[in-house]
Image (cartoon, rainbow, N blue to C red):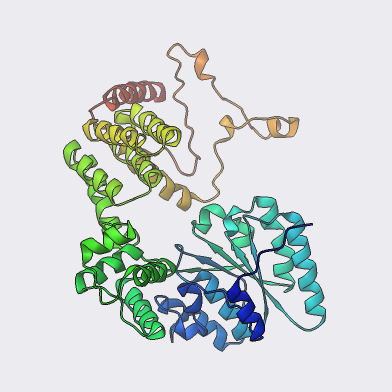
Amino acid sequence: MSPKRPQHHSDNLFAAAGLEREVPRPLPDRLRPRTLSEVVGQDHIVGPDGALTRMLETRTLGSLVFWGPPGTGKTTVARLLADATELHFEQISAVFSGVADLKKVFDAARARREMGTGTLLFVDEVHRFNKAQQDSFLPVMEDGTVVMVGATTENPSFELNAALLSRARVLVFRSLDAEAIEKLFAHAEEVEGKKLPLDAEARAVLVRMADGDGRASLTLAEEVWRSARAGEVFNAAQLQDILQRRAPIYDKGADGHYNLISALHKSVRGSDPDAALYYLCRMFDAGEDPLFLARRVVRMAVEDIGLADPQALVICNAAKDAYDFLGSPEGELAIAQAVIYLATAPKSNAGYTAYKAAMSTAKRAGSLLPPKHILNAPTGLMKSEGYGEGYQYDHDTPEGFSGQNYFPDALGRQTFYDPPDRGFEREIRKRLDYWAKLRAAKEK
């Protein structure tokens, strides 16, 4: 048998009074909105003209995907949505649930439906379900067994199946701005019946510490109240010492984030390794996700260096792998090294420009067939229709180049890639010019 928990004198007092001991609830839980109108920072969704407000006015609700950073109200809005539509609220997390769990939830929803009650199924971290698990939602979404509301911090376009996305509307939750965080602080002060013991500068720092996260802002406020002695008021330096946390140099969810990323990218493109390193280090210092920066550096390699230095992409991918292997702070040096390499490499956007031009032409050309001479003829019928007729095998020619037309006949030859005469692309330009002369000679 398990040993009994020793009783304390205070427990006996509560028992004698016939009272249950109430476990203290964290401030974010006590201040959770009770109606959609109390949700702050998401007026584009729950405001007077918000997407959900308009949806509720029609008394119809389809499946939804809530996409946004942590602490922006995704779970809260889902709960309130169930209340507003009189649906049973059921919550699961993709982190802890498997196929068997989903089957139980779906069976319970079907039974509930037969009794005349619908189900709003809130799926936290929905992007963590694999393809087969995501597909299992489709039948119950289609027949109305559940109204599925998925929450994700990742881009749904990349993380969710197209079939699931086609059956759900994506609503984007935004990081809370300073005004919204201030509203939360004011509400907390009203509920607690006391002001936060901070001077004006410290209060502004606390807003920045929340970093757009409403739940974090209230947790921080609660820590401030716990830490303050009677009559004590913290300044900014004391606040950071007390909380053992510094304010981010910029808001990763707003303009500062995008401004510094832009500055880094343009410094690399402008071949200034010193400026590029400065902006990279500012973002590291502010707590930016190094893997996010590694992805941006890979993007720079293909957009701004391209084939002027084919090693650029290899080095940037290696830097990403090195960070994965080493972690912070050692792995950050690999990303810094890649940034220096890119800034000092020859620059070319010819590949990037060629891709965009080819994509534009491909969209306009629609379903034009390639010329028949370059198509295989696996059947006699196809051979009799001219498939593969006249095809020249390039390796059998003296130059290893046949000069044939590979574009659809109706489109004619196009030119997308125009490499500059610098870096490795100088060699590519020589090859293209050589092949152009051969092609012209063969066409005479």
Residue 411 higher or lower than 140, as above or below: above
- Residue 12 position, x and y percent, is 64, 77
Q: Position of residue 72 (x, y in %)?
A: 45, 69
The relative height of residue 180 versus residue 417 in the rendered view (above or below) is below
Q: Residue furthest top?
A: 398
| Residue closer to the observer: 334 or 434 | 334
Q: Residue at x 37, y 44 (%)?
A: 290
Q: Position of residue 436 (x, y in %)?
A: 34, 25
Name the quarter where the N terminus is drawn.
Answer: bottom right
- Of residues 185 and 99, the one drawn nearer to the viewer in this rendering: 185
State the residue in front, 157 or 381: 157
**Does residue 32 show up?**
no
Taking the image as shown, residue 274 lies to the left or right of residue 25, namely left
Q: Residue at x 57, y 30 (%)?
A: 373
Q: Position of residue 408 (x, y in %)?
A: 50, 40
- Which quarter of the rendered picture does the C terminus lie within? top left
Q: Residue at x 52, y 56 (%)?
A: 157
Q: How many marks?
A: 0
- Please, is residue 227 above or below residue 135 in the view? below
Q: Is residue 137 visible?
A: yes
Q: Classify residue 174 by image quadrant.
A: bottom left
178 with respect to 59 (left or right)? left
Q: Foreground: 390 or 258?
A: 258
User: Which residue occupies the extreme front position in the image?
Assistant: 9
